[in-house]
């Protein structure tokens, strides 16, 4: 019988590239990058304008290397959990800096815990707003008979 590993730990994208995983060094054209991540060309240009991505230009064309592909994974996961561009820059600086990996993980965990607190507060406010709207709708239903 085959033994399947049950203890696999997947490093979150926000933690940057896994140094054990070989990277494909073939540069991607902007259209390939767009397709790979399911984003628009405008989105890629926006991240370039904000200094988060640094494609190589050959004439009028942009090409994204392994570093930009890794950064895009970080950007999208950070965006998905609601981090701001300033916070995303901080995360990128952290994962690309010289800080030891375990210290990076601790700092990233702290950033995520802070974001979780913010999101839970927002959720509570939304739940309260929904309850208020439910009461208003209930009152209208009674008035309309």
Image (cartoon, grey):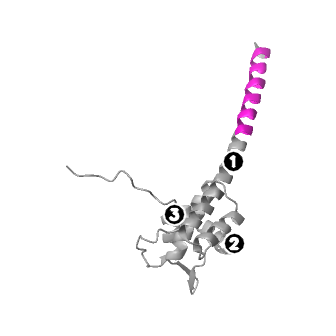
For disc 3, the marked residue is 37
Evaluate whether residue 39 shows in this view: no
Q: Residue furthest bottom?
A: 59
Q: Nearer the viewer, mark 3 or mark 1?
A: 1
SS at circle 1? helix
Q: Earlier in the sequence, mark 2 or mark 1?
A: 2
SS at circle 3? helix
Q: Is residue 93 left or right of residue 31?
A: right
Residue 4: image tag: none
Q: Earlier in the sequence, mark 2 or mark 3?
A: 3
For disc 2, the marked residue is 50
Q: Quadrant of residue 124?
A: top right
Rounded to the nearest angstrom, the CA distance separating label 2 from label 1 is 27 Å
Q: How many marks?
A: 3
Q: Position of residue 47 (x, y in %)?
A: 64, 70
Nearer to the camera, 92 or 3: 3
For disc 1, the marked residue is 117
């Amino acid at each position: 019988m085959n033994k399947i590993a049950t203890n696999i730990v997947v490093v979150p994208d926000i933690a940057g590239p896994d140094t054990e995983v070989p990277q494909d060094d073939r540069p991607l054209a902007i259209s390939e990058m767009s397709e790979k991540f399911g984003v628009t060309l405008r989105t890629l240009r926006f991240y370039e304008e904000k200094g988060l991505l640094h494609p190589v230009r050959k004439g009028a064309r942009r090409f994204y290397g392994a570093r930009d592909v890794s950064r895009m994974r970080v950007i999208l996961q950070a965006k998905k959990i609601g981090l701001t561009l300033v916070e995303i820059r901080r995360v990128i600086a952290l994962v690309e800096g010289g800080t030891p990996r375990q210290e990076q993980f601790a700092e990233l965990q702290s950033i995520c815990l802070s974001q979780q607190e913010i999101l839970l507060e927002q959720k509570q406010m939304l739940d309260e707003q929904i309850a208020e709207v439910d009461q208003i709708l209930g009152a209208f239903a009674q008035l309309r008979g």
